[in-house]
Image (cartoon, rainbow, N blue to C red):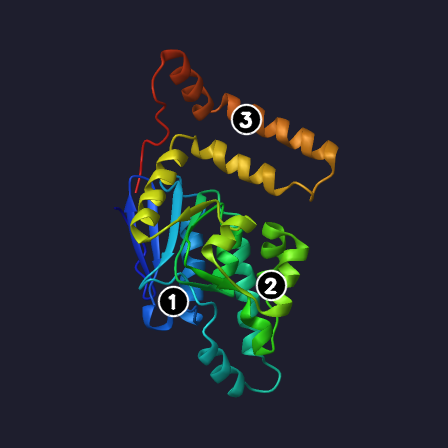
Amino acid sequence: MNNLPDFETLLLKGIDGRLYVTLNRPAQRNAMNNQMNKELHELVDYLTDNDAVRVLILRGAGGHFCAGGDIKERKSQTESSIEGYDPARERNIRSGQLLHKFWNLSQTFIAVVEGAAMGGGFGFACLADLTIIQKDARLGMPETTLGIAPAQIAPYVVNRIGLTRAKQMALTGARINGEAAFHLGIAQYLADDEESLNAIVESVVDQVERCAPKACAATKKIMQQVGRSDGEKMIVDAADIFSSLNKNDEGKEGHAAFVEKRKPVWLKEQV
C-alpha cells in the first residue's frame, strides 16, 4: 500500500490493484456531509490516470451503505445562508459533479450495498459498474417525502431501471429491499447475508481481474456512449478504440498468453 490519501470520513485499503473504500460515518448511517463530499471528490481525482488501481470497491461502515445526504447539516446551512448565496444549491451542484466523476472512472467501480442505500447512496448503487447487494438492504429515493427532488441521481436511476420504474419509486417515495433491487436490475449480484456478501465481493473482483484494465476502461466508454452518439460515429470511434487496444501492450500480452496457454499479466505496479 503506497501513498494512499488520508481522509477523515473515508477508510482506504489498497491490495494488489484493488482499492477498498469505506464510507465511515456509521453513527449517521454514512450520510454524506460536506466533508465526505469533498473527500470523495479528492478520491476520484486521485484515481484519475492512476494505473496502479484497477478496481474500486465502495461500501459503508456499521452495516449501512449510505443514507444519502446529511439532512441536518443541509437544514442548518440553509437556515444560516446569506442573501444571494444558496449553499444547498452549491452543494447539489457538487454532488452532481461527484456522481459524474464516478460515472466516468476508468477503473471498474463496484458498489457493495447493505443496510440503508437512500438518496445519493441509491444513486451510487445505480451508477456503479457492478452492484452487489444484500437481500435485506433498503433502497429508495425519499427526497420527495422531504419536499425536494432527487435532482442529481435521477438520470442514473432512469438509466439503470427505466423511466417508468424510476417515476414509480420517486413519485410514491417507495422503499424496496435488496431482493427487489436485484430483480429490477439495480444489482447484478444478490447475497443472503454478510458472509455471502463478502464472498461474492471477492469472487467478482477475481473475475474482473481476469480482464485487461485498459480494455475494461475502453469497454465502459463505448457502452456508456450508447444512445448518446449517432450510429456512424459510434462505429468509427469503436473501431479506433479496438485498433488502439489491439496494438498496445495489453493486446499483445493477451494474445501471447492465449497462444502460450498461460494467464496474462496485466499490472506490473499495484497499490
On the image, the x and y values in percent for residue 3 come to 28, 50
- What residue is pinned by disc 2? 169
For marks 1 and 2 on the same chain, the one whose residue lies earlier in the sequence? 1
* Nearer the observer, 83 or 230: 230
Front tag of 1 and 2: 2
For marks 2 and 3 on the same chain, the one whose residue lies earlier in the sequence? 2
Front tag of 1 and 3: 1
- What residue is pinned by disc 3? 244
Q: CA distance from mark 2 to mark 3?
A: 42 Å
105 left or right of 35? right
- What residue is pinned by disc 1? 30
> Which residue corresponds to the image point at 41% horizontal and 21% vertical from the top-left?
253
On the image, the x and y values in percent for residue 85 come to 59, 80
Q: Amino acid at mark 3?
A: Ser
Q: Are marks 1 and 3 in contact (CB under 8 Å)?
A: no
Q: Quadrant of residue 167?
A: bottom right
Disc 2 on helix, strand or loop? Answer: helix
Q: Residues within 10 Å of mark 1 (few under 14, many from 20)?
A: many
Front tag of 2 and 3: 2
> Which residue corresponds to the image point at 49% horizontal and 62% vertical from the top-left?
139
